[in-house]
Image (spheres, rainbow, N blue to C red):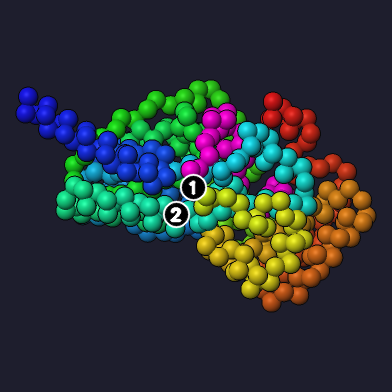
């Protein structure tokens, strides 16, 4: 009876933590232990295959990424937090609207999650408040807060704690929220009751694998970052491989295609916070307009945004590729001339990286078949 009473008391503690988290804008709280040994072989294989590309930090911490108690000595439990990020007021046909952006090659596409405030700032501040509330209400507690900011296997911790299952695109999927959410963690030195994992529900669906523009998803839950548009436009600092440039179309920061193709995202939820509303200029702006931003304008428009971290040089590199792709599908001479005029404004840029990508873009020749865009019949099939 004493044991049962103690377990009930601990469950009550978890319920209180979940209530505090909800008040802070989190969508779900889970808890897991620190044993991720089952994830270690997969992590080592992924690294051995070089799928992490130039993200050397993925390798530099060894297996600490899968060993919370080694990363933060004394850790006994990991609290996982999920926060939906679709902006308030998002239309019910938002997936169709996002696909349609690909039909407008003059428009620069920024991944949905990056159009608002930097999620690192939002989640970290609120996780810190949650941890402080726990100390205030529950007594002394050793903890450390993480939001995509350290060697942490976020998706595996989320899976173990019941936030969802790993989809074939490797992201966490939730039956009532799809995958349009951020993850964060609090490592604590107190044993808390765990929340149970959930069953996977992808079945035989391969929509995410089939839709990836660069075929970066090389197998279920296996992503070769070196081919991923999100990696190429955000993490990678070099010259984008020539064979991948046409496949990037007008995506200039990140890529949502695998998520847009996923049937579970019809259940994606909007955020309870205003932070993730799209900032002016980051949704619906033309490539030419974005390409015209000088560094001061770039820094001003991206202040407090995750986009700022790539810097102005990579921003111009990405847009130059998109302009080259827009030139390839220009419907008439006037449009092609306008694209070339925009590109010529950066043809003598001080950065060799920018000049090289501008040169490639100017060398593109308009063609009749819009091979780098979704064809209309494909779009119709996707949005039914």
Q: Judge the density around disc 1: few (<14), some (14-19), many (≥20) Cα neighbours within 10 Å.
A: some
Spot occupied by residue 285 in the image (x, y as percentages of width and height): 72, 55
Disc 1 to disc 2, C-alpha distance: 10 Å
Taking the image as shown, residue 125 lies to the left or right of residue 286, namely: left
Q: Residue furthest right?
A: 333
Residue 198 in view: yes
- Magenta part of the chain: 244-272
Residue drawn 26% across the image and 39% down it:
16
Q: Position of residue 251 (x, y in %)?
A: 67, 50
Location of mark 1 (residue): 273
The residue lying at 43 percent from left, 49 percent from top is 47
Q: Nearer the viewer, residue 36 or 90?
A: 90
Name the quarter where the C terminus is drawn. top right
Question: In the image, is 96 to the left or to the right of 144?
Answer: right
Mark 1 or 2 closer to N-term? 2
Q: Position of residue 141 (x, y in %)?
A: 19, 52
User: Camera-side residue: 23 or 351?
Assistant: 23
Q: Is residue 251 magenta?
A: yes
Which is in the foreground here, disc 1 or disc 2?
1
Q: Are marks 1 and 2 in contact (CB under 8 Å)?
A: yes
Q: Is residue 241 visible?
A: no
Dot 2 falls on a residue whose secondary structure is helix
Give the total of numbered labels: 2
Q: Residue furthest left?
A: 2
**Image-based side of 196 in relation to 226, left or right:** left
Residue drawn 63% across the image and 67% down it = 298
On residue 122, which mark appears?
2
Front-most of residues 186 and 165: 186
């Amino acid at each position: 009876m004493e044991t049962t009473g103690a377990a009930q008391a601990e469950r009550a503690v978890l319920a209180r933590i979940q209530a505090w988290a909800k008040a802070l804008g989190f969508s779900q709280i889970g808890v897991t232990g620190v044993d991720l040994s089952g994830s270690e072989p997969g992590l080592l294989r992924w690294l051995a295959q070089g799928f992490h590309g130039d993200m050397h930090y993925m390798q530099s911490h060894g297996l600490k990424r899968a060993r919370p108690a080694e990363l933060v000595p004394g850790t006994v439990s990991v609290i996982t937090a999920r926060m939906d990020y679709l902006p308030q007021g998002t239309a019910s046909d938002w997936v169709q609207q996002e696909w349609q952006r690909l039909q407008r090659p003059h428009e620069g596409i920024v991944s949905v999650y990056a159009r608002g405030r930097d999620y690192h700032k939002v989640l970290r501040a609120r996780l810190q408040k949650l941890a402080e509330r726990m100390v205030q209400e529950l007594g002394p507690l050793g903890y450390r807060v993480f939001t995509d900011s350290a060697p942490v296997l976020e998706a595996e911790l989320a899976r173990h704690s019941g936030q969802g299952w790993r989809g074939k695109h490797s992201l966490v999927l939730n039956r009532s929220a799809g995958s349009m959410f951020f993850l964060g963690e609090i490592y604590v030195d107190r044993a808390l009751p765990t929340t149970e994992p959930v069953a996977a529900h992808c079945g035989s669906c391969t929509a995410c694998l089939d839709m990836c523009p660069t075929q970066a998803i090389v197998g279920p839950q296996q992503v070769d970052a070196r081919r991923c548009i999100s990696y190429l436009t955000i993490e990678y600092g070099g010259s984008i491989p020539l064979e991948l440039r046409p496949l990037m179309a007008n995506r200039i920061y990140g890529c949502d295609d695998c998520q847009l193709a996923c049937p579970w995202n019809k259940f994606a939820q909007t955020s309870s916070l205003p932070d993730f509303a799209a900032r002016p200029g980051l949704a619906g702006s033309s490539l030419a307009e974005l390409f015209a931003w000088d560094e001061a304008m770039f820094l001003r428009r991206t202040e407090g945004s995750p986009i700022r971290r790539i810097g102005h040089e990579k921003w111009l590199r990405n847009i130059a590729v998109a302009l080259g792709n827009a030139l390839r599908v220009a419907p008439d001479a006037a449009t092609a001339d306008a694209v070339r005029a925009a590109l010529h404004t950066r043809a003598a840029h001080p950065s060799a990286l920018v000049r090289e990508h501008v040169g490639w873009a100017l060398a593109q020749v308009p063609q009749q078949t819009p091979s780098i865009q979704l064809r209309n019949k494909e779009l119709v099939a996707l949005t039914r």
